[in-house]
Image (tube, rainbow, N blue to C red):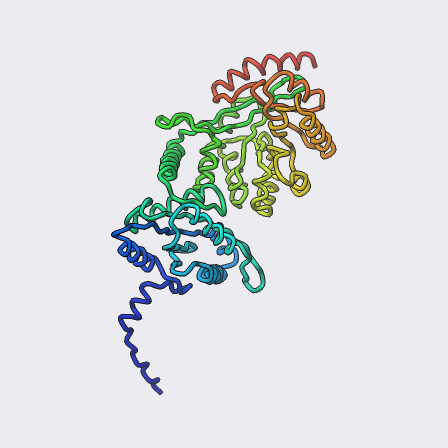
Amino acid sequence: MKPADTPFLPVSQNELQVMAYTDPLTGLGNRHRMRDRVSQISTERASDPAPFTIGIANLDSFKPINDLFGSAAGDEILCQVAHRLKACIPDGALVTRHDGDEFAFVLPLIFERASAEKFGQMIREVLSAPYDLGDRNVRLSASFGFAIYPFAGAEFDELLKSAETALYRSKRRGRSQITVYSREIAQEMKRATQLEQALRNAIISDAIDVHFQPIVSLSNNQVVGFEALARWNDPDLGFVSPGVFVPLAEERGFIDALSETLLRKATEAALSWPRELFLSFNLSSAQLMDPGTSSNVLSILGRVGFDPHRLELEITETAVMSSTDTAHRILSDLRQAGVRISLDDFGTGQSSLGRLRDFIFDKVKIDRAFVSRINSDRASEHIIKAILTMCDGLDLEVVAEGIEDYSEAVKLRSLGCGMGQGYHFGKPADGIATLRFLHENYYDSAAIDRVSA
C-alpha cells in the first residue's frame, strides 16, 4: 500500500526570518541577530551617541571536554550555558551564540569599563558552577572581551573586532580573564601578533639557536654536562627572551616544532663532546600532554645517533600537574629507553613532595630563588638542607641552579650538594664557544684526574 503523501507546508516569511536569526542548538539569537540589535541601538542614539557595550565570552578548555565525553555531552553543556546566560542578563540586553563555544552580549545600559568588568565577573561566577551530564559533573571557566561604543568602534564589524581583540588578550593571560578594549591593548595585541608571525618564520627558517650552560660537580668544579637553552635574536625585533617566545609557542600550538628543532640541534652539537658528559633539555607542559612526545623524542635521538643515556629531560612540577596520567606514561616510556628525568625549579610548586612520590625522577634542581639567598636568609639555607637530606634518602642527585659567586658554591658544597649551575661557572654559550670552553676547562683537568687516579 502506497503511503499517503505528506502535505507540503509552506514556511512563512516570518518563520524564515526567525530561522535565519536563531542558533538552532540553543535557541539564542545568532550573529545576524546581534548585528541587527547593534544597528538598532546605534540608529536610536545617532543624534546623541551614548555609549553601550558588546561582549564576547569563550569557554576555556571546552574542546578537550568535548573530545573526551563526546559531541552530545558538548552540546548539552552549550545548552546549559545558554540557559544560564538567558536567566541572568539584565532587561533590554541580548545574548547570542556564535561559532562553537563562543557567546556574545549586547548591553545597552553598560556605559563604561568598571560596569563591563563587573558584569563579566558576575557571568564568570554563573558559568563556573558544575555542569550536569547525568552520570558526571564537569566544571568550566570562561574568558571575556568587551568593547564600548563608540570608543572601540562606531560600526558593528569594528566594534566586534575590538571585542575579539580584548578576548584574545584575555586568552593570552590565562583562564577566566576579563579584558575591556582600549587603544593600549590593541597595540599590545598588534605587537603580540607580529611577534608570533616572526617566531613562526624563525622556526621555519631554522633561526632559533641553542646555547649551552655548564653543570659542574661542586666537589672539584669539573664539568659533568650542559643544559640546552633556546636563544632567538631576530633581525627586526632584536634579542627576544625565551621567557617570552617559549610560552608564546606553547600558547599558539607550535611548541612541538620549536622543541623538536632545538633538541635536534642540541644533540647534534653534543655529539662533539666527550661521551661522559650529559645533555639536559627542557620539556614543556604542552609536550607532557601530548601522547606522541616520547616517540618524537626517541625518533630524534635515533636520527641524530645520540645515546639516550646521555640525555636528561627537565620538567617542572606545573607541567606534570597539567595531565598526570599522560605525563606519567610519557616519562615512563622515556626512562625505559634510558633517558633520565629531572624535576626543575624544585620548591616553587604547591605539592612538590607529592610529585616525588607519584613520579620516578633521577635528579632534582633546586630553584635559584633559594640559592641566591643561601648566605643571607636562614630560612633559604634550612630549606636547601632539608631538600638535600630528603634527596639523599630518595637516592636522587641534586643540582643547585643560579650560583652567582664563589661563596654560594662553597656553602652548597659544605652542605653536601653534588652539582651546581650558574654564571659563576659559565654563562650560556653557542656550540662553537662551548667546544672552546671544553678545550680550555675540561680536557686538561680530565687528563690530570686520570693521571692522579
Residue in the image at 51% along x and 18% along y? 435
Q: 353 or 376: which is nearer to us? A: 376
Picture layout, residue 113 above or below residue 409: below
Residue 197 visible in this rendered orientation of the protein: no
The quadrant in which residue 139 appears is bottom right
Residue positioned most to the bottom = 1
Q: Is residue 446 left or right of residue 35?
A: right
Residue 263: x percent and y percent?
A: 49, 32
Picture layout, residue 34 above or below residue 244: below
Residue in the image at 54% along x and 33% along y? 282
Q: Is residue 9 left or right of residue 392?
A: left
Picture layout, residue 244 above or below residue 328: above
Residue positioned most to the front = 48
The quadrant in which residue 444 appears is top right
Q: 277 or 375: which is nearer to us? A: 375
Q: 205 or 447: which is nearer to us? A: 205
Residue 427: x percent and y percent?
A: 53, 20
Residue 400: x percent and y percent?
A: 63, 26
Residue 183 visible in this rendered orientation of the protein: yes
The quadrant in which residue 312 appears is top right
Residue 267: x percent and y percent?
A: 51, 29
- Total marks in image: 0
Residue in the image at 46% along x and 52% along y? 59
Q: Quadrant of the C terminus?
A: top right
Q: Is residue 186 left or right of residue 354?
A: left
Q: Quadrant of the N terminus?
A: bottom left
